[in-house]
Image (cartoon, coloured by chain):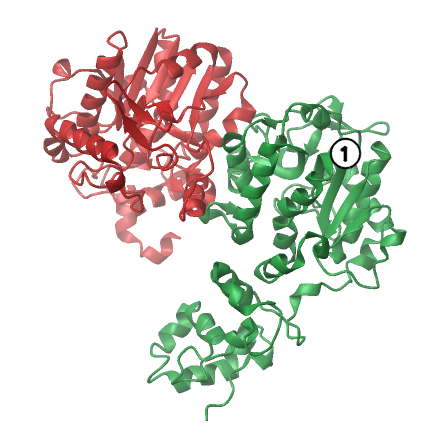
Chain colours: A red, B green
């Protein structure tokens, strides 16, 4: 049996609830385990959630506090993927399918589940045909910046090549999961570009219906009949609402403002219904839940620039707790150095 | 239709590189025609009758459409961008075509590639077949991610529908996007190949450690050279690449990674030395002095990088100018020398663009069409032209 896995910060838990309920409708037999890349402070009772919540500490990340300082929540959630997948294989699961929390299951995931039975690693490419329309080149460039594969769907099986892939990806993501396209990085995702040539038994699923999002929707327009939702001539099984804000349900994605959904009533209806589901699942309440590891011990917020500075100067504070505030701490150094000295 | 051909692309000054590829290819594949596309204009220095390859010029490929590419791109990016154009031309005439990029040496039969082409429509070679483990391995893998998963050093293509679709798509993309701009997702023609295996049918990724050996994996791939053909990780090496190898810097394997030295590489270092000797024997010292056709306008004025950048930025709007190198009334050259604003004729479009690329100059002269106009023009006349290394002929004419 395949285990479904996901990773979320607290404010994404309403998305996970919607994913969990849509998954249960299509696959009542599958369990969903969710790693919290964050820490609960009494916001919810995990026992009443429609998924199994895995606390961050359970992964046993080496130097967890350094890891949490190095990365902001988005980078952290991305970088934890191979660690979670290995942990779940260690728990005895033969196949694990990772899904991003901002996904909706709209039909059985059999193409993914069946392909994963045959492979050590399973990936889905962003584009399966050239982009069309006046934005074609710009859209393809965006994929070149982000990576050939979408990190929102990752399948892995407990066999040597699956384990080798995870070990390789982990070693890279310990330090290199930033959004830094000029360096060849885009969170966890660009590393996947290398994987098909490095690992055997790696499958690439060519099915737009198994990861439909703003990047491939124009070539696979949505439609529906009484029974099902389709994208192009395929069954639409898994919709990825990357960059969707339920408070702006008329925009499919903040990453694709050019995409005008008004010509497609099926799409519009889907966006509004997903927005309603997220709101019903507590989206607005969760917006008020603060992520952990966003502040120094004295309450001062940690900025992106500070995290990046820490990354570049980390060798100078090998034993310090980066969140600490006393003399000799990273914060102390920040406060006593002119910005120009830091580069 | 003939069965097989091979080809490369160079400017005149790199003709010796093409000779070395052609000669080494034909040693292992006798009787297979080898084509060299000149990304340049032929001249009397080059006598194609004495060469052992068949020379193609832009005239054969539709020069009128391609001339804008020659202004848009510097010499090397131009030779890269022309790859799909050349392959479109050859694939109508040959069933299978092998493209080999400049800075290569064929050391054995390319049978693994040809065998893959029996079924595949397009064969690509990845930079890496296994994770890097040597010195700086993470930084070196990141360098690959900046450059692209596949190395454009060798391509195999079979004449079929999906290959033609691929070439038409690739040509469309590199026509305006063959720059080196990693932050934009670009690495000349090469990063586009990352998308090809999923966009087109029947693309095969060749896993032969002996085909397309280069600096990027050399610390890990083991090269042994005892007899005629080197072995790489125990298999015969058919193609060795020397990207960024400049025989002028002794002991340096590539300008892209200066810590890799030839003596570090032992047997692989000897392959570099051998290549350098082949280049010299092929007349590299003489050819590298040959002129390049497209670094000047028709009137002889040198083309500075800003001019290419502006021309590229105009996309397809440049059709209005006709021949991009012309200097007549409605030419791009004349357009560059027109005033940015008619009430301030001394500040030409070219100089205004240069001004906008210099934050310090913008800070010193914040009102270029008003209070700071005279000051800016003075700076251009006294200092600016030197700082941009521009021909004085680009200087603004005196304001009436």
Query: For residue A97, what is the image quadrant?
Result: top left
The x, y position of residue B294, in whole percent, is 66, 64
**Residue at position x 39%, y 11% in the image:** A95
Q: As drawn, is B366 to the left or to the right of B260?
A: left
**Residue at position x 29%, y 32% in the image:** A68
Q: Chain of mark 1?
A: B
Name the element at disc 1: strand
Q: Which residue is mark 1?
A: B4
Classed neighbour count for the residue bearing mark 1: other residues with Cα under 10 Å, few (<14), some (14–19), many (≥20) = many
The x, y position of residue B322, in whole percent, is 58, 67
**Residue at position x 19%, y 26% in the image:** A13
- The one of A315 and B159 positioned closer to us in this rendering: B159
Could you tell me if residue B112 is visible in this image? yes
Most extreme residue toward the bottom is B400
**Residue at position x 11%, y 34% in the image:** A284
Could you tell me if residue A157 is visible in this image? no
Q: As drawn, is A36 to the left or to the right of A319?
A: left
**B60 relative to B364, above or below:** above
The x, y position of residue B22, in whole percent, is 81, 42
The x, y position of residue A34, in whole percent, is 26, 19
């Amino acid at each position: 049996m395949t285990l479904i896995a996901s990773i979320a910060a607290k404010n994404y838990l309403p998305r996970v609830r919607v994913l969990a309920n849509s998954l249960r409708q299509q696959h009542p037999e599958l369990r969903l385990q969710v790693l919290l890349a964050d820490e609960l402070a009494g916001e919810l009772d995990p026992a009443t959630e429609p998924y199994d919540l895995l606390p961050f500490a359970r992964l046993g990340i080496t130097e967890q506090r350094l890891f949490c300082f190095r990365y902001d929540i988005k980078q952290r959630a991305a970088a934890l993927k191979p660690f979670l997948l290995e942990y779940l294989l260690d728990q005895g699961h033969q196949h694990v399918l990772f899904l991003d929390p901002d996904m909706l299951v709209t039909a059985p995931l059999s193409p993914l589940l069946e392909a994963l039975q045959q492979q050590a690693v399973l990936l889905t490419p962003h584009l399966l045909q050239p982009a069309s329309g006046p934005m074609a080149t710009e859209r393809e460039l965006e994929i070149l910046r982000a990576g050939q594969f979408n990190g929102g769907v990752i399948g892995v099986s407990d066999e040597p090549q699956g384990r080798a892939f995870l070990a390789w990806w982990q070693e890279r993501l310990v330090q290199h999961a930033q959004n830094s396209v000029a360096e060849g990085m885009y969170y966890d995702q660009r590393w996947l570009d290398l994987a098909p040539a490095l690992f055997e038994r790696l499958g690439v699923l060519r099915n737009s219906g198994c990861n439909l999002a703003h990047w491939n929707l124009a070539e696979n327009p949505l439609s529906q009949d009484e029974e099902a939702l389709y994208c192009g001539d395929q069954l639409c099984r898994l919709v990825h609402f990357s960059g969707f804000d339920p408070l702006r349900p008329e925009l499919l994605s903040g990453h694709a403002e050019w995409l005008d959904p008004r010509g497609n009533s099926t799409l519009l209806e889907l966006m509004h219904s997903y927005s309603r589901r997220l709101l019903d699942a507590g989206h607005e309440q969760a917006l008020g839940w603060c992520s952990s590891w966003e502040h120094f011990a004295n309450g001062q917020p940690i900025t992106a620039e500070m995290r990046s500075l820490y990354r570049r100067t980390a060798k100078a504070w090998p034993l310090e707790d980066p969140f600490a505030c006393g003399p000799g701490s990273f914060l102390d150094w920040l406060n006593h150095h002119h910005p120009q000295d830091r580069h | 239709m003939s069965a097989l051909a091979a080809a490369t692309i160079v400017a005149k000054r790199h003709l010796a590189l093409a000779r070395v590829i052609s000669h080494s290819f034909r040693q292992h594949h006798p009787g297979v025609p080898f084509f060299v596309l000149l990304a340049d204009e032929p001249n009397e220095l080059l006598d194609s009758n004495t060469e052992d390859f068949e020379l193609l010029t832009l005239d054969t490929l539709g020069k009128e459409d391609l001339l804008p590419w020659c202004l848009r791109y510097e010499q090397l990016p131009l030779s890269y961008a022309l790859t799909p154009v050349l392959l479109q031309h050859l694939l109508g005439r040959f069933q299978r075509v092998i493209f080999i990029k400049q800075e290569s040496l064929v050391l054995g039969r390319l049978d693994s590639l040809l065998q893959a082409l029996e079924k595949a429509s397009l064969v690509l070679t990845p930079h890496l077949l296994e994770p890097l483990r040597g010195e700086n391995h993470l930084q070196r893998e990141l360098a690959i991610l900046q450059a692209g998963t596949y190395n454009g050093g060798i391509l195999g293509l079979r004449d079929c529908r999906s290959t033609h679709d691929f070439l038409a798509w690739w040509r469309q993309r590199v026509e305006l996007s063959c720059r080196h701009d990693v932050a934009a997702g670009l690495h000349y023609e090469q990063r586009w190949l990352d998308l090809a295996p999923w966009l087109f049918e029947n693309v095969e990724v060749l896993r032969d450690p002996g085909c397309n050996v280069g600096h990027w994996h050399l610390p890990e791939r083991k090269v042994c050279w005892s007899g005629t053909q080197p072995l790489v990780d125990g298999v015969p090496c058919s193609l060795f690449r020397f990207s960024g190898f400049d025989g002028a810097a002794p002991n340096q394997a590539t300008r892209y990674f200066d810590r890799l030295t030839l003596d570090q590489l032992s047997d692989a270092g000897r392959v570099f030395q051998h290549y350098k000797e082949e280049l010299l024997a092929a007349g590299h010292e003489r050819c590298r002095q040959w002129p390049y056709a497209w670094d000047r306008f028709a009137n002889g004025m040198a083309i500075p990088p800003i001019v290419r950048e502006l021309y590229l930025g105009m996309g397809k709007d440049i059709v209005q100018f006709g021949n991009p190198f012309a200097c007549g009334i409605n030419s791009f050259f004349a357009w560059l020398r027109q005033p940015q604003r008619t009430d301030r004729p001394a500040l030409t479009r070219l100089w205004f663009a240069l001004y906008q690329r210099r934050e310090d100059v913008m800070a010193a002269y914040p009102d270029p069409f008003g209070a700071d106009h005279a000051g800016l023009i003075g700076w251009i006349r006294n200092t600016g032209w030197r700082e941009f290394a521009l021909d004085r002929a680009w200087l603004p004419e005196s304001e009436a």
